[in-house]
Amino acid sequence: MARTKSPKPARAAESTTNADTPNPVWFKPVMFGFMLLGLVWIIVFYVSNASLPIPAIGSWNILVGFGIAFIGFLMTTRWR
């Protein structure tokens, strides 16, 4: 009785999840861009004596700057 050979031996399940794939090329510049933009936003607010970037929201400009920078810091958790 002839045996039939399988073309390839059985392998363990190969994992091709998103955790194994590297980030796209644009990810790192955007991440650092958000962090720097938030920092520049806060510096402009203090240097301009609260007359820039958006004078109508007053001290909320600090929160906007930290929010923009925080988006960049959150992106660092996904950086591979």
Image (tube, helix red, strand yellow):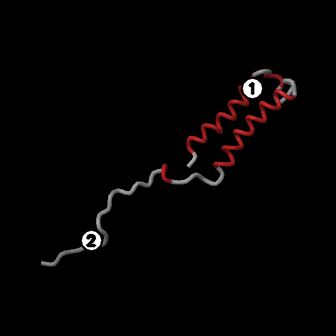
Label pair 1/2, CB-CB below 8 angstroms:
no
Q: Earlier in the sequence, mark 1 or mark 2?
A: 2
Picture layout, residue 32 above or below residue 51:
below
Residue of label 1: 62
- Give the image location of residue 19, x and y in percent: 48, 49
Quadrant for the N terminus, please: bottom left
Query: What label sits on residue 27 in the rendered view?
Result: none
How crowded pointer 2 is (Cα within 10 Å; few <14, some 14-19, many 20+) is rated as few
Query: Hey, what amino acid is under mark 1?
Result: Ile
Q: Is residue 64 left or right of residue 13?
A: right
Question: Element at badge 2?
Answer: loop
Q: Position of residue 60 (x, y in %)?
A: 75, 23
Mark number displayed over residue 6: 2
Query: For the residue marked with disc 2, what is the amino acid?
Result: Ser
Mark nearest the camera among 1 and 2 is 1
Element assignment for label 1? helix
Residue sitting at x 48%, y 53%: 20
Side (left or right) of 6 relative to 61? left
Q: For residue 68, what is the image quadrant? A: top right
